[in-house]
Amino acid sequence: MNTMFKIGGGLIAFGIATEIVYQVYLRWKGKRKDKDPQIITDVLFFPDKRVACLDFFHKPKGCANKNCRYSHSDNSLSELYRHLSSAKKCLDVCVYTICCKELCDILISHHKRGVAVRVVTDNDQLNLTGAQVWRLRSEGVPVRTGNSSYYMHHKFVIVDRELLLNGSFNWTRQAITGNQENLIVMNIPHVVNKYLGEFEKLWVEFNPANVHKSELHAEAKVQLVNGEEKW
Ligand SMILES: [Zn+2]
């Protein structure tokens, strides 16, 4: 009987000790999560009332124009300027429509400072009024597009391979001051890594050499269907 009491008491003591250890672990884990300064999550909503002044938010000397008609107050676009400007090593831009001069000014200035800027965009958007792709290319920024009749419809940017901005936001004046748009900002590694993978996949796929190969392949298919024997 005594032995039974001893075994029962031992089991209860073991159960209590296990529960205490588990509760201490949960509290430690909770505190660690609260204190983790590495996680950034935010969302920017558009439209803004006015376009943010790039000089005011981006240039060290600020805006010298006393009659500046752009906004000097914080808004969603100024936050986007800030995130893009924070790039120290690389900026990967994958956006369907790129017509905003101010955002491209940041890409060009970063490119000139040695930040590795890469741009993927849609081929059908190249000749839109205000399209900035030709300007980016003339300044030496590498830009790649596919040749598909389907859209390269993404709108995301990765800063220094660790911060992701993704949402509905195209780089146009209409998106800045007209449309309802959203842009999520996060640095959750497993999510950012998936977007990095998608960017690298498109970068290879849209390499002019590979695009040319796929054009030849498509042409060969057409000729085969038509019963010609050139291929
Ligand atoms: Zn200004």
Image (cartoon, helix red, strand yellow):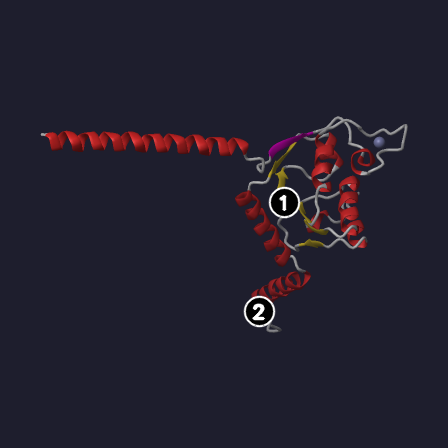
Q: Of all residues shown, which one is farthest toward the left?
A: 1
The foreground one among 120 and 129 is 120
Give residue 181's quadrant in the image.
top right
- Quadrant the C terminus occupies: bottom right
Crowding around mark 2 (Cα neighbors within 10 Å: few <14, some 14 to 19, many 20+) is few
Give residue 86's quadrant in the image.
top right
Name the side, left or right, on which 67 lies relative to 3.
Answer: right
Give residue 129's quadrant in the image.
top right
Q: Which residue is mark 1?
A: 153
- Magenta residues? 41-46
* Residue at 65 percent of width and 60 percent of height: 211
Secondary structure category for the residue under label 2: loop
CA distance separating discs 2 and 1: 35 Å
Image spot of residue 13 (x, y percent): 25, 30
The chief SS type of the magenta part is: strand
* Residue at 62 percent of width and 73 percent of height: 230
Image spot of residue 22 (x, y percent): 36, 33
Q: Identify the amino acid type marked 1.
A: His
The foreground one among 28 and 138 is 28
- Quadrant the N terminus occupies: top left
Image spot of residue 229 (x, y percent): 59, 73
Disc marking residue 227: 2
Q: Earlier in the sequence, mark 2 or mark 1?
A: 1
Q: Identify the amino acid type marked 2.
A: Gly
The foreground one among 152 and 185 is 185
Name the side, left or right, on which 160 lies relative to 69.
Answer: left
Picture mark count: 2
Secondary structure category for the residue under label 1: loop
